[in-house]
Amino acid sequence: MMDYLKRYIYNRRKKSLIYGLILIMTIIFFGFLVQFDLIRIVKGIPSMMNLFERMLKPNFGYIGEVGEKLLETVEIAGISSIVGIIAAMPLSILISKNIAPSKILWRVLNLVFGIFRTIPALVWAAILVSIFSIGKFSGILALSITSFLVSLKMFKDYIEGINQNVLDSTRSVGGSNFQVLKYCVFPTIVEQSVAIFFTVLEINIRGATVLGFVGAGGIGQIMWRDLNHLRYDNLSTLILFLLLIIFTIDFISLNIRKRFRSFSIDFKSMDSFKNYKKAKNIFFLLVILLVGVVSYRAIGINMERMIVGLKQGFNIVSRMVRVDLSYMDKLLKGLLESISIAIFATIIGSISSLILTYFSAYNLRSNKYTVGFFKFIINLLRTFPSIVIAIILFRGVGPGPLSGAIALSFYTTGVLTKVYSEVVEGLPDNLLNSIRVTGANNLAIYKEGVIPATMPNFISLALYRLESNIRNSTILGIIGAGGVGTSLTMNINWRNWERVGLLILGIAITVFAIDLISNKIRDKYI
């Protein structure tokens, strides 16, 4: 027995050593590709510290000047979230495998929407600004497209999760396809719409903060101006108020979703139930009408400009489909840089999140103040889009893939730590107590019990993060942080639409391929 235990420990240590060496070699390889330079980072620390010192002195009088743009950012995010969800509701029926009226249409639509979903909102915004000019209309339209695609995927997952027996039982009693939709599918869509709305809204609030970088409305335009003018006191004010807005929306959405999940009505009669259903349908129609009116007033574009924009859009799209294959070398070079940034950031963020989760999971720490402090740090890291962090890092390390890789690493750390700590906090107490009674401390419990038990979940989360990081890395180049976005922005500004078409096609194929590979890995090994 003792010999078996020694062999087990020896083999485990040997396997850990091999995995560790592979991980270190991978970090070194991709670190080389993103031009990682520790000396350069160390030399840049004084400049970054000076920047943070200046940011610690916010100009609160500045909020009066930019209050309108802050509200515009929230308006863009809110309208686009609702528009995207409403548009996704009916179309989700066509792409859900268990109820799709045509398998051929189901395959085609899933492929098309899957490819479109790979294009980041900032890229949509940059193209739409070229079509409809600068302003919040382009921003609303860009985020509405991404909201629609994200909501479509989420509705699809919920519909395909309906128990097949429920659908079959409705059909077995003579129910038509419409009745199956009415009694089985529509209730699921409506029930999940609130949760999906707040999930999409949280995403859009963060996305709307940077749309102004390409002239698509919101606070980003002012933020970009202040960065160029080195007005870090003004920038600090914007960041503080954005933090307040994001935290407030996160708090409201969390509480509403909790209440919605536990919401129930005890109907006294069938008439009261019917009246409730009628009232809910009327309310739903009023919401759609209200959104239509508010959206019309908010878009800030007249019909004449819309017609001109559509003509320009048709001309741009017709040029984009005639891709310029002579630009392939630049595409491949940019994609390699974007992929390197994404993989490097995912690895560094994953390692960092394993460390931070130990301090931020409440069932591993007895001191609630320690947990609260680290949860605040995590929320701070994940609040800002990586593109904003990259701009701040320019002061220390300059433009290029290194600033993009570090920025995306910070953001990945915040997001992964949050979701992984929730996994850890969801573990049954019996698992932790069974290790704790042996006299093990919290670190031993985490290392020997929690990590092995949750590693499949962690790998799955890391793979999802890699997919998202590939998308994020493609837009970092828009502000000079490396990757294919540099060439994309340059060619959009120069109106080289044939090259833009090739770059977007390359981005879409790359992201789509990585999505498929990661899905295969999850299905086979996790």
Image (cartoon, grey):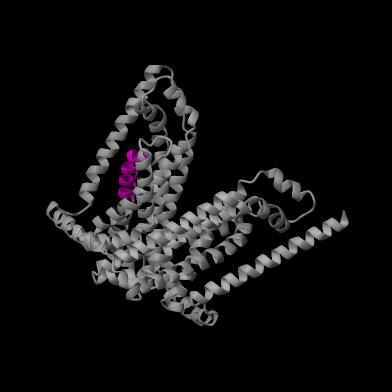
Along the line of sight, the residue nearer the viewer: 173 or 466: 173
Name, please, the residue furthest toward the left.
304
Main SS of the magenta segment?
helix
Residue lying furthest right in this view?
2
Specify the quadrant of the image occupied by residue 489.
bottom left
Q: Residue at x 32, y 51 (%)?
A: 145
Question: How many circles with numbers are drawn on the protein?
Answer: 0
| Residue 81 sits inside the magenta stretch | yes
Q: Which residues are magenta?
A: 78-92
Please name whichever residue, 79 or 462, is drawn nearer the observer in this view of the structure. Answer: 462
Q: Position of residue 104 (x, y in %)?
A: 36, 42
Q: Position of residue 310 (x, y in %)?
A: 18, 55
- Viewed as shown, does residue 117 lie left or right of 449? left
Residue 456 in percent (x, y) is at 61, 52
- As for residue 189 lying within the magenta part, the answer is no
The percent position of residue 161, horizontal first and vertical second, equals 48, 37
Q: Is residue 220 visible?
A: yes
Foreground pick, 345 / 509: 509
Identify which residue is drawn at 54% across, 79% down.
Answer: 38
Residue 109 as seen in the image, left or right of residue 322? right
Left or right, 86 with reference to 350: left
